[in-house]
Image (cartoon, coloured by chain):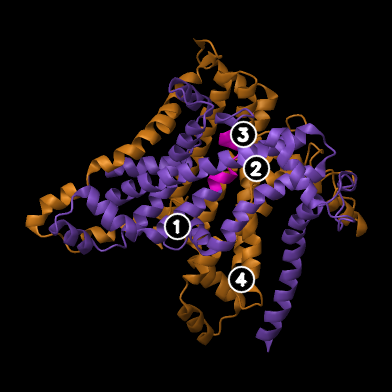
Chain colours: A orange, B purple
Amino acid sequence: MTTATAPASRSRDDVSPPRPALRRRMKSSYPTWFFIPAGVFYVVLFLVPTIASFYFSLTRWTLFEVDFIGFDNFVRFFQEPQLVQGFLNTFIYAFVTSASKVVLGLLLGVFLSSQIIARGFLRATIFFPVLVSTIGVGILFKVLMDPFGGPINEILGAVGIQGPAWLTDPSIALLSVALVDIWKGVGLAALIYIAGMVAIPQEYFEAAKVDGAGAWHNFRHITLPLLRPATVTVVLLSLIGGLRSFDLIWAMTKGGPGFTSDVLASVIFKQYQAGFFGLSTAGNVVLFVVVAAIIFPLSWWLNRKGDEQ
Amino acid sequence: MRNVVWKWGAGTVAIALAFVVFIIPFAFILFTAGKTQAEAAALEFTWPTEWVLFENIVTVIQTRDFLLVRAFFNSTVLTVVAVAIMVVLAAMVGYVLQRRRSRWNPLVNSLVLAGLIIPPAVVPTIWVMQGLEIFKTLPGLIAVHVAFGLSFCILLFRAFVATIPRELDEAAIIDGAGPIKLFFRVIFPLLRSVIVTVIVVQAVFVFNDFTYALYFLPGDDNATVQLTTFNFIAQSTSSYNLLFADVLLITIPPLIMYIFFQREIVGGMTSGAVKG
């Protein structure tokens, strides 16, 4: 789930080297074949398909035959307006959801770490949607956001606001789905920040108090820098999730109206359903490249900057 | 004084907000599921004039020849078997990965990271599954979940094994334990707390999964619970009461998990935020 745990486990290796007589037996006590059973699942059902996708993306592929056609699928992918739209929407969706989760998660995390009543209840409440099935949430909000008599617009109307046609207006359908994604996922971001807050030693705040720092200075110069690992985790998790997002969009709009809320993952499914396996796989390769091109450099950069401090 | 005002004032405002933003939507599910078809079609957030929740649930369960019962059975088998396999295999990898420095480690570590980040290639996976004749079968979906879920489990196990003293291993080896006995009799029982975490987090994930079931296990005969909702969407747009009764039913298992294992779920999903 997180890339951040990786280096933590290394230190143990250096503690108490086994006595020489034991060393050979120790070594064989940790057999490399323990990797094999897990490796079989991973290689057969994840690695092989991933590598094969590069070949199949260059083919016209139906149930019965495979024709090699070079880069035609990719050319098509960046020529047909609906596919280009899906490509761009993927970035918009991922950026909007992860930026909002960072900001709201940080605010909620700091707020729910302060001394207020019913803290445990509030934490439990905002986290619960994370565990509910995405399809259930999608169905629920599709009804709540119904432009004709849906509860959200009824309530907005009662206070004199003309609610938008959330999911049927082409210009905001994608953002409406993103809003629900934020609603569902912000609890996880907030809890990651709370875990980060717990790890900040109280002494820092006491020392700052002696120096006469106010609440804003505390936040700006102690809390924010020390929450950096939490921010890295939230950014990476929500970007990975946002770029791959499929089920919420599928449950709420199916990419519509038209194809205005399509993203790469829903394009992949639609092309697969239509029987264009080669084109669908090309979409997979594009998604692969997009995710890798964003996540790997970003995580390297974020983690490196953390080390320098 | 200021603290008391903050404590009660901000707390009260937050409770009111949480109520509107988070609790009312879930109440809406419950109320709509309890209404008659005509009343539910109005899509209003009101107390049902007549509670027919039980009748609705019975109708949902009986729909299409007890499809939901079969779906619950399928989802349970899927979740239990997939998570069990994941836990044992990932614990083996995480354990050796942490204990032994071999030239395979960098490769395995990068494969684990790749598994976390890279989206699975859908149609080629179907192609492989067809070759193995496990496409559209429950064992096939189980295998897919295991393959895609291993990485996350391995990370948790590797971090936890680091906290188990090596002296325990040495003592067991001196007593003559072989590698299998050492792992399954000595180490595995000590992993209990992280095993609970992995089980609940992955169980919620597998149970809630929609995408993989849609791709790799299509068809009504072996639907999983997440797919059953589409019956009531397709069937007719006006039976919102049945649709929400179904949503209510598939929300209950994660809710139960959350009530009993809140600490493990939160701990598992937020791990890594602190250590950096």
Tell me the magenta residue range.
Answer: B205-213
Of B262 and A297, the residue lying toward us: B262
The numbered mark, 2 or 4, whose residue comes first in the sequence reads 2
Q: Are marks 3 and 4 on the same chain?
A: no
Of A57 and B93, the residue lying toward us: B93
Secondary structure under the numbered disc 1 in the rendered image = helix
Chain of the residue where label 1 is placed in the rendered structure: B
Image coordinates of residue B193 in percent, x first then y, are: 41, 61
Q: Is residue B57 magenta?
A: no
Q: Residue at x 7, y 56 (%)?
A: A21
Dot 1: within a 10 Å radius of its alpha carbon, few (fewer than 14), some, or many (20 or more) residues? Answer: some
Q: Amino acid at mark 2?
A: Tyr
Which quadrant of the figure has residue A130? bottom right
Distance of label 2 from label 3 (alpha carbons): 30 Å
Name the quarter where the C terminus of chain A is drawn. bottom left
- Which residue position is annotated with label 2? A93
B261 is higher (above) or lower (below) than A165 = below
Image coordinates of residue A73 in percent, x first then y, are: 56, 18
Q: Are marks 2 and 4 on the same chain?
A: yes
The numbered mark, 3 or 1, whose residue comes first in the sequence reads 1
- Which residue position is annotated with label 1? B196
Q: Residue at x 77, y 57 (%)?
A: B27
Secondary structure under the numbered disc 3 in the rendered image = loop
Chain of the residue where label 2 is placed in the rendered structure: A
Q: Are marks 1 and 4 on the same chain?
A: no
B55 is higher (above) or lower (below) than B142 = below
- Which residue position is annotated with label 4? A120
